[in-house]
Amino acid sequence: MDTRKAGALLRQVAILHARMQREGVDACCGGATGTQCLILTELGRTGPVTLADLVRRLNLDKGWVSRAVESMVQQGLLRKDPSPTDRRAVIVSMTESGASLCCDLNEFLDRQSERVMQRIPPAERENVLRALTLLEQALREELEGRPLPVWVED
């Protein structure tokens, strides 16, 4: 396997996908920033979390996330409540407006992905989906620092 080619291709796919989402989100979310969209989609996946957990999950600067959350609270998209178990922690959750925008965003991104998949020959779509599933698993394992599997080659 040519690892340089695989690495370059993976970087290019990531860049193109991020660009496509960023440009689409600008049209879809009425001025929401990329960070705000990340926050909404993460809260949509996880439900309410502490601000510290949100920062860890997004792997972004704490000040950057805090400012974005505060702006979203002011816009009525998020709510901050004191943690019932830790006086120093704040629980971040979506309001009804935030959940509605998150739903719109996810529907938009799903349609966008469907259009991209339509550009792939029908006979290859299942292979692409399988490869994406394997790639996601491998990326998660790499981020978690799991040992490499021992593959037996035929």
Image: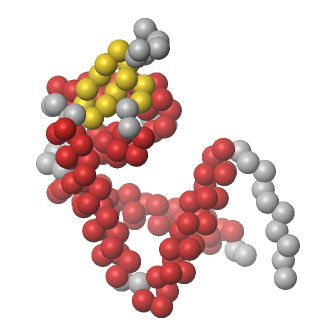
Q: Quadrant of the N terminus?
A: bottom right
- 125, 13: nearer the viewer: 125
Q: Quadrant of residue 63?
A: top left
User: At 42% from the left edge and 89% from the top edge, which residue is drawn?
Assistant: 122
Q: Residue furthest top?
A: 87
Colour treatment of the image? secondary structure
Q: Residue furthest front?
A: 84
Vertical order, 23 against 91 (above or below): below
Q: How many marks?
A: 0
User: At 38% from the left edge and 57% from the top edge, which residue is drawn?
Assistant: 18
- 112, 86: nearer the viewer: 86
| x, y percent for residue 142 | 67, 51
| x, y percent for residue 136 | 56, 60
Q: On the rendered structure, is 14 left or right of 47?
A: right
Vertical order, 28 against 119 (above or below): above
Residue 32 makes an appearance in the image = yes
Q: Quadrant of the C terminus?
A: bottom right
Vertical order, 137 against 48 (above or below): below
User: At 66% from the left edge and 51% from the top edge, which residue is drawn?
Assistant: 141
| x, y percent for residue 8 | 57, 66
Residue 38 makes an appearance in the image = no
| x, y percent for residue 51 | 41, 25
User: At 66% from the left edge and 44% from the top edge, which residue is drawn?
Assistant: 144
Q: On the rendered structure, is 54 left or right of 81?
A: right
Q: Quadrant of residue 117?
A: bottom left
